[in-house]
Amino acid sequence: MNLILFGPPGAGKGTQSALLIERLGMRQISTGDLFRAAIKNQTKLGQEAKGYLDAGKLVPDSITIGLVEEVLLDLNGKSFILDGFPRNVTQAEALEQLLKALKLKVDKSVFLEVPMSMLLGRLTGRRVCKNCGTTYHIESKPTHKEGVCDVCGGPVIQRPDDKEDVIRTRLETYENSTRPLKDYYKAKGPYVEIDGTGTSEQVFERITRAIQVKA
């Protein structure tokens, strides 16, 4: 079962991907994680991506698709979930060609719908470990000790792209670029829209019910 999981920033794509990986044994392909790894390793693509991410802008398609292709080539037959990619119709079309060339397919596209009024609070409260990447939230999932990661003891920070002015830019960019994907995948099918509000377990149950698998 190969999935595309998409929706606005703060919709919970990362959380649901983690649950799908843990319980269904899928391989997550998150462009955000790919970018952060490339930035941490100071690769050429990582340095190029950093400037765009810090400004709350989308990374150019050529960089994004190149990173995704590298991961798809290394799947070794494992099911995958594309988390937050593609972000626009141009990327979706490029992905379709890439999957066809690799003789892979997406079984279902899952859209997480969350009201815009809830997204800003979710994102501005998000914190992340600088070392291991574990994600927290100052209200719903705080660290046991302020500023210290529960997992590895590393520093927990607010990413530059989670500050309010940058988030507003991200949401505006999303509205202009990503919303049209709904129409694209509705036409392509199979497509399902999931209510992304409530607890992570409630949302996960909706997803597994929609894709007809048991967790």
Image: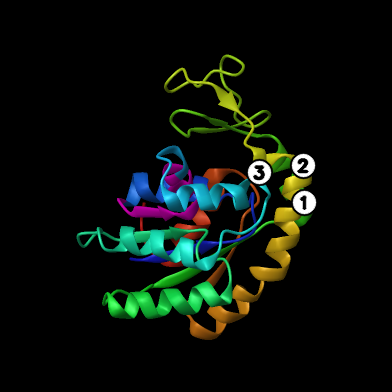
Q: How is the image coloured?
A: rainbow
Give the crowd class for mark 1: few <14, some 14-19, many >=20 residues within 10 Å.
Answer: some
Q: Which residue is mark 3?
A: 161
The amino acid type of the residue labelled 3 equals: Asp
Between 180 and 157, the one nearer to me in the picture:
157
The amino acid type of the residue labelled 1 equals: Arg
Give the crowd class for mark 2: few <14, some 14-19, many >=20 residues within 10 Å.
Answer: some
* Relative image position of residue 141 (x, y in whole percent): 59, 30
Q: Quadrant of residue 72?
A: bottom left
* Relative image position of residue 87 (x, y in whole percent): 57, 66
Q: Quadrant of residue 112?
A: bottom right
- What's the magenta region? 25-38
The answer to whether residue 19 is left or right of residue 162 is left
Between 162 and 56, the one nearer to me in the picture:
56
User: In whole angstroms, how far apart are the C-alphas of marks 1 and 3?
Assistant: 10 Å
Q: Which residue is mark 1?
A: 168
- Residue 191 visible, this angle: no
The amino acid type of the residue labelled 2 equals: Glu
* Total numbered labels: 3
Say if 190 sits above or below 23 in the image.
below
User: In whole angstroms, how far apart are the C-alphas of marks 1 and 2?
Assistant: 6 Å
- Along the polypeptide, which appears first: circle 1 or circle 3? 3
Mark 1 and mark 2 residues within 8 Å of each other at the beta carbon = yes
Query: Farthest front residue?
Result: 44
Q: Secondary structure at mark 1?
A: helix
Q: Which residue is mark 2?
A: 164
Does the magenta portion include 156? no
User: In whole angstroms, how far apart are the C-alphas of marks 2 and 3?
Assistant: 8 Å
The answer to whether residue 185 is left or right of residue 211 is right
Q: Quadrant for the N terminus, please.
A: bottom left
